[in-house]
Structures are given as structure tokens and as C-alpha cells.
Amino acid sequence: MLDPQTPFLLADETKIDRNIDRLQAHLERFDVPLRPHVKTSKSTVITRKIWAGRTGPITVSTLAEGEVFAADGFTDILYAVGIAPDKLQRVVDLRRAGVDLTVLLDSIEQAQAVADASSTYGVPIPALLEVDCDGHRGGVLPGDPAAITIAEILNVGGAELRGVLTHAGESYFSYSPHERAAAAETERRTAVAVAETLRAAGHPAPIVSVGSTPTAHAVRDLTGVTEVRAGNFVFFDLVMAGIGVCALDDLALSAVVSVIGHRPDRGWILTDGGWTATSRDRGTAVQAVDQGYGLVADIYGELLPDVLMSGASQEHGVLSVRPGSGAELPALPIGTRLRILPNHACAMGIQHSKYSVVQGSSPVIVNTWERAQGW
Amino acid sequence: MLDPQTPFLLADETKIDRNIDRLQAHLERFDVPLRPHVKTSKSTVITRKIWAGRTGPITVSTLAEGEVFAADGFTDILYAVGIAPDKLQRVVDLRRAGVDLTVLLDSIEQAQAVADASSTYGVPIPALLEVDCDGHRGGVLPGDPAAITIAEILNVGGAELRGVLTHAGESYFSYSPHERAAAAETERRTAVAVAETLRAAGHPAPIVSVGSTPTAHAVRDLTGVTEVRAGNFVFFDLVMAGIGVCALDDLALSAVVSVIGHRPDRGWILTDGGWTATSRDRGTAVQAVDQGYGLVADIYGELLPDVLMSGASQEHGVLSVRPGSGAELPALPIGTRLRILPNHACAMGIQHSKYSVVQGSSPVIVNTWERAQGW
């Protein structure tokens, strides 16, 4: 297979398989199914690996992902971003095509819009109620009477409140397994409590959906939970390594770049991989160890000690040694290919339309996998 | 024309036309042609506006841009990122297809690779020598004898050193017209000096290429310069407004998002436009006024006073009032469409495959323009 020209996105299939096995082994003890969030890989091939090539229940972040995965045979899809009313037509189209698509909401206005669309189109639309467990983003607070009102509005309109969803977004800042286990327990307890409130008011709420990559790997009790979501775990990244959820050796995604210049007077090596290839994500800037725009490995995946991608413009990357490390820049001739490991795998992925696939330390590209794009 | 669903990229044609007219009026007095950098718009339609619908000389940041613009009839193209040797086959293919494509280099190794490719393929490849005028990125320093060696290597191999190029990258941090005029004079003086050195050594170096959006608008003397490059000026952005190159009212690019939630307890409005729609660029974070992930306007382009996009996750935006402003969040019902003005137009643009086009304050979409994508 012909290598693409740099910059391009590289996925290590060996590490992806290992990362999937690890989370599944952890979750097996709870007998609660995984509903992976495909926003990270946006790849049907990678997602099918979770079920040995078959399909399974998934979470999507855009309707475009839903449409691409539906076309590949996925039929159980949760769209986990609060529904905008004018997207309901596409939701109805997917449901009419045989996809069991569930939407997310946290307001009376959205419930009314979903109920109205269900009745207008004659297609009952199931919804989960978003619950806020840690002040990270959206969701009703536990105890908010709006939960019951929302359930009632949906029932009257022929839609259906299927249950509750929460996401411990703050767990991305949890530096120990103990903290992450506590965040997982907060997710569980919060979601189960709101589900119980709904049930006490006569609304069945069969689904209790929780999860994030940090909490999914740390959770110790899933009593009352019916599904676990996680997305980043297929690749991991420097932010996840920085809080200890994975090792650097687990990182399965990188951008391949070429050396195009040297500025020894400034301690720089220049590459053809700028922020269009890596994204502008600087997630490790708030962590104990700032990894710049990413760590640098050779084309076999071997890290170059203390070499960082320290700067980025649109189509230029700047590599330099970690400040204070005393390291020296290695001699890398013009044309040398390198792998840049991402701060944030989801953000690096978004910049690309496909993966070039390698297996472990071999630089030989054995496959090309497409990514769902747009909205 | 049917409106796309949010988030999507909006271009205001009225403002684009005005921005183009402004720079052209400024440059007309010097009688030096503009070679626009199309990395910002990546749109043949927008770029053709510079020559009333015709083609003209352009600068590209990727060979993919070169190929897309060549297919649209552009024949004079400068690829202004230091050449990686394995891209020379595509350069040769474009030259054989009748495109006068020039590459950029700043090292003896690259010159050797260009000379070798010119002789191997029997296609002389013209090159510009990148000169560093302000320590911003790549380029030889003025006075570096490598300039002459590079010219000699190219001549021996049947390639051609067409001249020199420099870019005042540091001018993006120049807060006054006076500073920007000084940066423009540094660009001019540095490039002309290196060209004169080459000429004194018997290398004609007919091209002296300078420019950036900040310097192009401020330049007072272009003696010895043969072309001016600028890219961002078609749209402008909050970084450019922050240093005073344009007014907020000149910003011609935005991402349209929909309100999907409210968190009055936290002072947040949530939208369906996260960093996938706006990019992670936080260019104004280092300026006097930090604009978060962008300023917020209504769908007609009218700014909502002191409302910022203050947070971003993959498919969620968080809007809140500017800290310390004492402003109150406006009442924006679920489904309200808003325009988010970018920190960095190039970075927001990269996240999208096309423009929905409006004219001035009308929210009616009158056209769709494609963007070149990938590398």
C-alpha cells in the first residue's frame, strides 16, 4: 500500500486491540454492556472491533456519525448532544430507516419539541434525560422537578422518556484511580437517584447510562446502571496518560510529519505538520507535565527522549527539547518522518478524513480506514 | 437555498468584497502585485474576486490547495512551505500539467533534492529562498553564505533560484500601525538585501516576495519588492481586530450555532457548536482583550454586548458574559441561531468543508462555496 504524503493520521491497530481488550476485561466483571462513544474514532472498522467485527450499541456526537454508522448496519444509536429542534427531521428519517435512535435533552422546551415532532411525524422519538453530576456542562440537577415535567410532556406527545444519562466530565482532571473511582460512583449514584425519582412518579426510565474514559476504567460498582459509555479509550492520548489512565506506550494515534528544516541557532527542527495536522488542543498545558503540542516519536513509534512539538502554525510544526531537560536535539535529516503523539486524540482525529493503519512498531501501512466527517 | 443544520461556516460576501477592495486600494499606490495566500479561504470563488472573477498569482500552503486551484485554471502558484523531498513528484506533475509552480527552501539538502528531481524528471523546478526576517520560523539569516551555495546547487542541477521570500510572522503581535510599518520595512529591507547578495554573486533572483496581512496593510515603501503576500485579509478575525488591523465590523467569517440548553445557575448558555466548529484556537488569549473562543453575534451579525463563547468541548459551546462586565446573559430560547466570530479565521475555516454565503446583515443563504481540503 502506497504511503500517503505527510502530514497524515496514523492508527496502530495492535494498540487499539489491546486498549479495547483492557476496558472490556475491566467491565466484564459488572455484566453491564459498553455503549462506546464513536466521536473519538468516527470509524466503523475500529468500533466493530469491540464486538469482533459485528455491530453493537453506540453513542454518537453528531447526526452525521449516526448516518454513517447506520449505513454500515449499526441500529442502536444514542445521539448524546442536547437535541436542537430543527434536527428532529433527520432523527425521524433515521428512525423510519429502522435505526433505534435515542436523543438527549434537559429542558422542557426540548421535551415539547420532541413530543411535537413525534406526534407530527407519527414517529415516537425516545429520549434520555441529561443529568448533571459534576457541574461540567449541561443537564438537570438531581432533585430538579423539571425531570418529572419533562417525562410527562414526552408521554403526552407519544414520545418516550427511556431513562437518564450522565457524564463525569470533571474526571478528566482526576489524577488518581481513587479520585476516578469516586467520580464513577458520583456518576452512578446521581444517575440512579434521578431514575428512581422518575420511577417513583410512574415513569419507568429503564435506561441508566453513565461513563467517560477515566471513570469507565476506574469504576468499582455499577449497581443500577444499564450501560457504560467511553470513547477515548480506543486510542488514549497524552491527557489520559497525564492523569494516569494509561501509559504512554498505550497511545495508538499519531500524526506523521516530515522534517523540512533546521534552526540550530534557535534549537528548532521544523516539520510540515502544523496545527492543521495536530489540532490546536493544548490539553496537557493544565497538567503537571506540559507536553506542548505533543511528544515526538520516530516512525517506529519509539519516543525521542525529551523532544516536544513546542510550536505550531498552520502548516509548520516546531520541535525542540523540553525546557530544563538538558537534552540535545537529535540529528534528523530533511525528509525524516516522525510520529507526533496527541494531547487529545479526538481533536487530532477531527483534522483528518482517514487513518493509515500500522501494526505495532512496523511503519508499513497495511490499511486505510475512513472517518465520518462533518455534522 | 436550504439552510444547513448547525454548526456550519458562514461567509459574508459583502464584507469579503470590502476587505479585498481595502487592501487593493492600499497596494495600488505601490504598483506591486498581490499574490494572495489562499490558505485562509481555500476557495477559488473568493480568490477570483481579487481579479474580478479571473485568476491571478497565488500562494498555497499545501499541494492539495495547488491541485484544486490548478484544476480551476490558476497557473501561477507558489507553494510557500519548505519543500519535503518526497513531495517533488507532485510538484513535477503540476508543472507538467502547465502550472508554473514554485517551491520554497532554506537548506542545502533541499536545494540538492530539488536539483536532483529537476534533472531526474527533466523538469526544471523553480524555487524561492526563504529568508528569516524576525526569528519567527524558518529561513536562512541575512548574510548566511548558504544562500549562495543553494543558488549554485540549483543552477547546476537545472533547477532555478527565482529569488527570495520572507514573512514577518512577528507582525501578528504588533499593536500599532507604526510597529507594523516598521515590521513591513524589516521584511522589505531583509528580502532586498539577500536578493542583492545573490545578484552580486551572479544569480539574477528576479523575485522578491514579502508579506503578511498586518504588514501588507501598513507598508509604506516597497522599493525592490516584486510581490506582496497576504491571506487573512479576506475575512479578518478577532486576533487582527485585537491588534488594530481591522474593525470588528470587518469580520466576514463566523460559525453558526444553535442554542441547545441553559444553565442559569452557572451563567451559561449551551450551544451545539464546540471546538469542532470553531477550532481550539485561542489567539486572543495573549492579547490585551481575551475573547475566549469568540465573540457572539445574532444571526444578523449584530454583536451581543459582552457575550463570549467561553468554553468548548467537542460538540458543545458554552456562552457566558465577559467577566467583570456586569452584563446579563440575554434571553435566547432553545433553537436560537447565533454567529460565533473566530479568534483565527484560518483555524475556524479548516474545520469546515464549505461556506454558506450571506450578504451583509441578511441571514438568507445565497450560495455555497467549497473549500480545498487535506494535504
Image: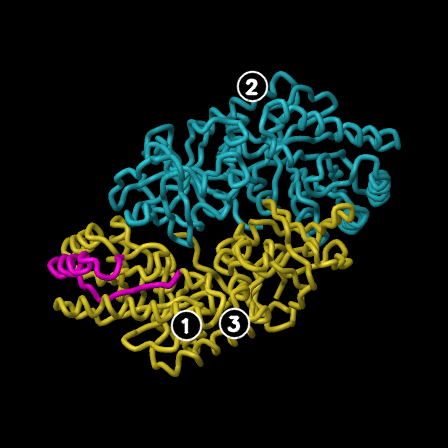
Chain colours: A yellow, B cyan
Residue at numbered disc 3:
A16
The image position of residue B252, as x and y in percent, is: 44, 32
Q: Amino acid at mark 1?
A: Ala
Q: Chain of mark 2?
A: B
> Closer to the camera: disc 3 or disc 1?
1
- Extreme residue toward the left, this view: A156
Q: Residue visible at 70% across and 45% down? A: B82
Residue A292 quadrant: bottom right
Residue at numbered disc 2:
B25
Q: Which residues are magenta?
A: A140-169
Q: Chain of mark 3?
A: A
Residue A181, labelled with which disc?
1
Q: Are marks 3 and 1 in contact (CB under 8 Å)?
A: no
Q: Secondary structure at mark 2?
A: helix
Spatial separation of the CA atoms under disc 3 and disc 1: 24 Å
- Extreme residue toward the top, this view: B29
The verdict on residue A17 being magenta is no
* Horizontal side, residue A353 vs residue B187: left or right: left
Crowding at mark 3 (Cα within 10 Å: few <14, some 14-19, many 20+): many
Q: Secondary structure at mark 3?
A: helix
- Identify which residue, A6 or B185, lies in the foreground: B185
Q: Amino acid at mark 2?
A: Ala
Check the image and report above or below for B368 versus A116: above
Q: Residue visible at 68% across and 58% down? A: A307
Q: Residue visible at 73% across and 34% down? A: B133
The image position of residue A56, as x and y in percent, is: 35, 73
Q: Secondary structure at mark 1?
A: helix
* Horizontal side, residue A174 vs residue B336: left or right: right
Query: Which quadrant does the N terminus of chain A fall into?
Result: bottom right
> Closer to the camera: disc 3 or disc 2?
3
